[in-house]
Image (spheres, grey):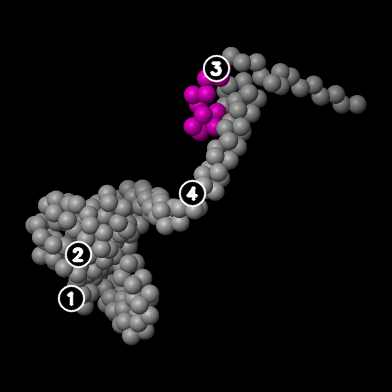
Amino acid sequence: MIIYINDKPCEAQVGDLLLKVAQLHKSHIGCICGGNGICQSCFVYVKEGAECLSPPSKEEQAFISDKLFQEGGRLACRSVVVKEGTLRVLSRAEYLKRVVLGLSLKEFITYAQTIGYNVSTKLPDGAGNLFGRFKEGNLNPLDSLGKIGNGLAYGSLFASTTFMESFPFMQYPASLLAEGAKGLYTGTAAVVCNVSAGRLHLPGTESCGCGTDKTPVLESVKIIVK
């Protein structure tokens, strides 16, 4: 089946997680917490085909108000495709971008009011949900930090890739900078390797083939104090 994420057609199958479908097809849906159901950056508006997704999870019920549910609000990290059909969703960022570009002050005010209402009414429930998951051992702090790191890394990579695709004329200067940085790093690694007689290597240069039996560049240093 085809899912339209921010109007981009993405191939999916029953059982797929909506967030993973977006990531696989590079159709932007936020995931700062790495899919832990914490940050709500993967919030989407389901514009068509809500019946194709799994029922709202406990996390969604804790973080999303009835008003946002009525507007099609879901968390992509908790929404699984359960049946085939036509499914269209917009990420929160895409929705807001269209509101701003549409220069609709009324729509922007309505959006801000809805988000403000959601935060004020669901903050206690959301905090309680997080505390409960920590208490039950369903949310590991270290694991969560790792997933947040992965989420930020994915977001950075996606942003840089999208930037290059949107502004192809920047690819050449960017590649020059990358090659320059690579050359500087390689040169520094060679100096460190030679001075330490092959005992020290910068990360990623361990297999430089220098061996450990090289004579150091500085064999000895004599200090004379008068």
**Residue 12 in sight from this viewpoint:** yes
Spatial separation of the CA atoms under disc 4 and disc 1? 43 Å
Task: Please say if the residues under marks 4 and 3 sit with CB atoms less than 8 Å apart.
Answer: no
- Number of other residues with Cα within 10 Å of mark 2, as a class: few under 14, some 14 to 19, many 20 or more: many
Secondary structure of the residue carrying numbered label 3: loop
Question: Horizontal and vertical percent for residue 212?
Answer: 56, 17
Total residue callouts: 4
| Front-lying residue, 217 or 7 | 7
Mark 2 against mark 4, which lies toward the viewer?
Answer: 4
- Which amino acid type is marked by label 1? Gln
- Number of other residues with Cα within 10 Å of mark 1, as a class: few under 14, some 14 to 19, many 20 or more: few
- Residue range (magenta): 201-212
* Depicted 190 relative to depicted 178: above or below: above
Task: Please say if the residues under marks 4 and 1 sit with CB atoms less than 8 Å apart.
Answer: no
* Depicted 13 relative to depicted 58: above or below: above
Q: In the figure, residue 213 lies in which quadrant?
A: top right
Name the residue carrying label 3: 211
Name the residue carrying label 1: 70
Secondary structure of the residue carrying numbered label 4: helix
Question: Horizontal and vertical percent for residue 34?
Answer: 31, 53
Spatial separation of the CA atoms under disc 4 and disc 3? 37 Å
- Which amino acid type is marked by label 4? Gln
Q: Is residue 170 magenta?
A: no
Is 118 left, or right, of 190 in this rendering?
Answer: left
Mark 1 against mark 2, which lies toward the viewer?
Answer: 2
Whichever of labels 4 and 3 marks the residue nearer the N terminus, that label is 4
Spatial separation of the CA atoms under disc 2 and disc 4? 32 Å
Name the residue carrying label 4: 171
Name the residue carrying label 2: 88
Task: Please say if the residues under marks 2 and 4 sit with CB atoms less than 8 Å apart.
Answer: no
